Amino acid sequence: MLAKEFGIPPMEETQALYSQIYTEGHDRHHSPIQYATTSFDQAMEQIRQATNSIDLARDQIQQALQFVTKFTEHKD
């Protein structure tokens, strides 16, 4: 979806997390309680990582906007 909408692939960390969640989600050796706890912990970790990624992206966007602003001011 990222590649389609924004022309960028998911970060390696996102791909690794997806792979881990997918693999563990298909592992039938977990009890329902253990699976629920693991799933909750994974979801919370995914939220933490996503928040960090959003913060990093926000910083990168801000830096790019500052560069563009400086570049366009000097062109005039």
Image (spheres, helix red, strand yellow):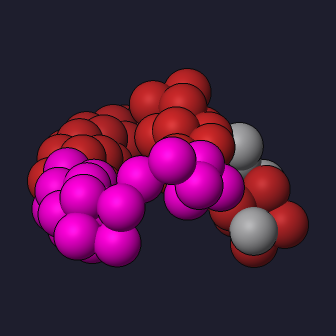
In the rendered image, the residue lying farthest to the right is 4
Q: Quadrant of residue 6?
A: bottom right
Looking at the figure, which quarter contains the N terminus? bottom right
Q: Is residue 63 visible?
A: yes
Give percent across and percent down for residue 56. 23, 42
Rendered view: 12 above or below 7: above
Q: Is residue 5 left or right of residue 12?
A: right
Residue closest to the eye, 1 or 8: 1
Residue 51 appears left or right of 75: left
Q: Residue at x 70, y 47 (%)?
A: 8
Residue at position x 18%, y 63% from top?
Answer: 37
Residue 28 image point, x, y percent: 59, 55
Task: Answer with left or right where residue 12 lies relative to residue 52.
Answer: right
Q: Residue at x 84, y 66 (%)?
A: 4
Residue at image position (45%, 31%) is 13
Q: Nearer the viewer, residue 36 or 40?
A: 36
Overall secondary structure of the magenta stretch?
helix
Q: How many marks?
A: 0
Please, is residue 39 above or below residue 56 in the view?
A: below
In this view, 36 is above or below 15: below
Expressed as whole percent of the image width and height from the top left, the position of residue 23 reads: 62, 43
> In the rendered structure, which segment of residues is drawn in magenta?
25-45
x, y (%) of residue 55?
17, 52
Q: Is residue 10 visible?
A: no
